[in-house]
Image (cartoon, rainbow, N blue to C red):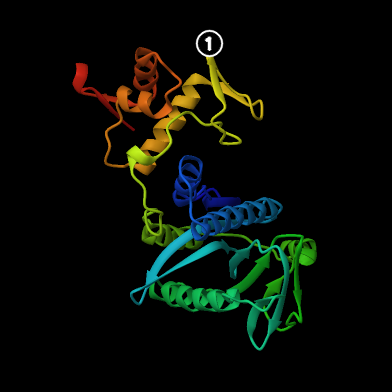
Amino acid sequence: MWNMSILPIKPRFEPEKLKIYRFLNSRMSLTEKETRYYHNLVKGYEGEVMFDRLMENLLEERLIINDLLLEQNNTTFQSDSIIFSQDIINLFEVKNYEGNFKYESGKFYTLSGNDIKNPLHQLERNETLLCQFLQSIGCYLPIEPHLIFMNPNFTLYQAPINKPIIYPTQLVQFMEKFNMKRSKLTNKHSKITDVILSAHLIESPYKMLPSYNYNLLKKGLTCALCHSFSISVGGSRVLCYKCGHNESVESAVMRCVEEIRLLFPDIKITANVVQDWCRVIECKRRISRILSKNLTVIGYGKWTYYEL
């Protein structure tokens, strides 16, 4: 049984697809469409992180499941966040839209008149599929859906008053109202969430990626903060001339390993590969020591490679 408290039993992590796009954005030229998609990924994740911080103010006993991907009736659906309370399940669709929008004839538009994907339709679809999934596992708790707009610079003109929308100016009031509801969880709740987590699907991060290959990507060590290539190595530290950030050489090498692992999952991690990728660390023996310390060593001599 879970320790009953305000517990993210499935925490939120930065999506691997977002990491891949960030790596590629530093090492190649993305098209305008790819850049826009990348910025939308960044914006969306930032909004979800803001939402998570807001939920840290929850009281009573709750169970939180983030980024849940399920399948129902041969259809996959992803929920930004689901919160289990004593007598109800709250389903959240989180948006980080910025700027001015309008709602007209059941659709969302930018003020310039461009039609955008209706997040209410997405929320309704997720609610229907989640309800069907929960009933299939014997859970009949009612679902209360919410569309949350997190960005304080978001405005929706002609906003509907009969839709489950929470606007940035309503977030404090929403949390106060949420916390007024008492919640005590039982073994039944933990068993239900265990079944849900066991059904979670792992989505491949390699869908909708730009075309790229190893030889055409820019090589070199990048800054962990500003992603600049203006990097120098001195002693055990790595310094960025652009923003002043510094980190240990070990940390920088392991960041390179993560880049290689995500961008090229079929390439074996070797000291030669890591040295070629980061370029600024000239001592291959030093790289080998770092890899041996943090990874599992496979093979011997020139056939040595490393695995997580």
- Taking the image as drawn, is residue 51 in sight? yes
User: What residue is pinned by disc 1?
Assistant: 235
Nearer the observer, 71 or 5 = 71
Viewer-nearest residue: 262 or 93: 262
State the image quarter where residue 270 is shown: top left
Tell me: 138 left or right of 36.
left
Q: Is residue 81 found left or right of 55 in the rendered image? A: left
Residue 67 position within the rendered picture, expressed as x and y whole percent measured from the top left? 50, 58
Say which quadrant the C terminus sits in.
top left
> Residue 86 in the image: x percent, y percent?
60, 65
In the rendered image of this protein, does residue 305 appear above or below residue 176?
A: above
Residue drawn at (33%, 44%) of the image:
213
Q: Look at 59% across and 58% down and name the residue there.
A: 44
Against 180, residue 221 (above or below) is: above
Q: Amino acid at mark 1?
A: Gly
Which residue is at the far top? Answer: 235
Q: Residue furthest bottom?
A: 105
14 relative to 87, above or below: above
Left or right relative to 154: residue 45: left
Q: Nearer the viewer, residue 109 or 160?
A: 109
On the image, which quarter does residue 172 sit in? bottom right
Relative to 243, say whether 141 is above or below. Answer: below
Quarter residue 294 falls in: top left
Which type of secondary structure does the marked residue at label 1 adopt? loop
Local crowd size for mark 1, using a 10 Å CA cut-off: few (<14), some (14–19), many (≥20) = few
Q: Please name the residue shown 53% across and 10% down the image.
A: 235
Residue 173 visible in the shown view: no
